[in-house]
């Protein structure tokens, strides 16, 4: 579907999701858990990591955008690169259990709704509208977990 719609970055993102899901599963089970709780705690990103994430996000965005503009027939390279680059970062943040991933997902999912409306991918529009709502719920649930851990 993404290939037929010339959403090449979104198509490639599906392969990343498989790899990062395996990483996230392993990290949640065996990752850094300072007080030996049975569950990896929800964490908050510090200022230094935010800067690093911002720089990496821009680098990923520009790299994907360059490829889409120079080597594809995509009619939406800017939005495809934007939603894909932030999805890459948000998924990594989710795997590391940073609560701020949900804020990025809300933005990405909402922006994706607009992108998929433009592309007339109606079932995908509905799916990403549901994802947007789920991201709100995810944020508030993790916020409760964060408060109970503190």
Image (tube, rainbow, N blue to C red):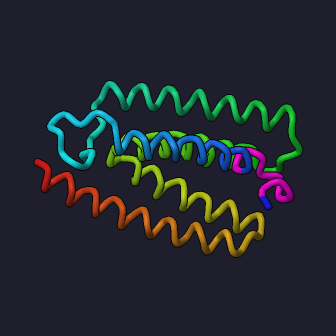
Q: Quadrant of the N terminus?
A: bottom right
Residue 45's image quarter? top left
Asked whether the viewer can see residue 42, the reply is no
In the image, 126: left or right of 53? right
Residue 125 rendering spot, x and y as whole percentages? 65, 70
Of 95 and 3, nearer the camera is 95
Residue 5 within the segment the image draws in magenta: yes
Of 128 and 97, nearer the camera is 97
The segment highlighted magenta reads 2-10
In the image, 120: left or right of 131? right
Which residue sits at x=62%, y=59%? 112
Which residue sits at x=59%, y=47%? 17
Principal SS element in the magenta part? loop
Residue 110 within the segment the image draws in magenta: no
Residue 97 rendering spot, x and y as whole percentages? 35, 45
Residue 102's place in the image compared with 72, above or below, is below
Residue 144 rendering spot, x and y as whole percentages? 20, 60
Residue 11's place in the image compared with 30, above or below, is below
Asked whether the viewer can see residue 69, the reply is yes
Which residue sits at x=42%, y=47%? 94
Residue 9 rendering spot, x and y as whole percentages? 72, 44
In the image, 137: left or right of 133? left
Count of all numbered marks drawn on residues in the image: 0
Which residue sits at x=55%, y=70%? 129
């Amino acid at each position: 579907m993404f290939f037929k719609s010339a959403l090449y970055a979104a198509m490639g993102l599906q392969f990343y999701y498989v790899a990062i899901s395996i990483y996230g599963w392993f990290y949640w089970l065996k990752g850094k858990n300072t007080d030996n709780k049975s569950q990896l705690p929800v964490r908050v990103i510090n200022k230094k990591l935010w800067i690093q994430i911002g720089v990496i996000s821009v680098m990923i965005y520009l790299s994907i955008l360059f490829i889409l503009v120079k080597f594809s027939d995509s009619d939406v390279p800017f939005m495809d690169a934007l939603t894909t680059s932030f999805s890459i970062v948000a998924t990594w943040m989710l795997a590391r259990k940073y609560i701020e991933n949900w804020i990025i997902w809300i933005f990405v999912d909402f922006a994706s709704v607009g992108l998929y409306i433009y592309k007339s991918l109606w079932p995908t529009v509905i799916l990403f509208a549901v994802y947007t709502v789920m991201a709100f719920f995810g944020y508030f649930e993790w916020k409760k977990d964060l408060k109970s851990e503190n």
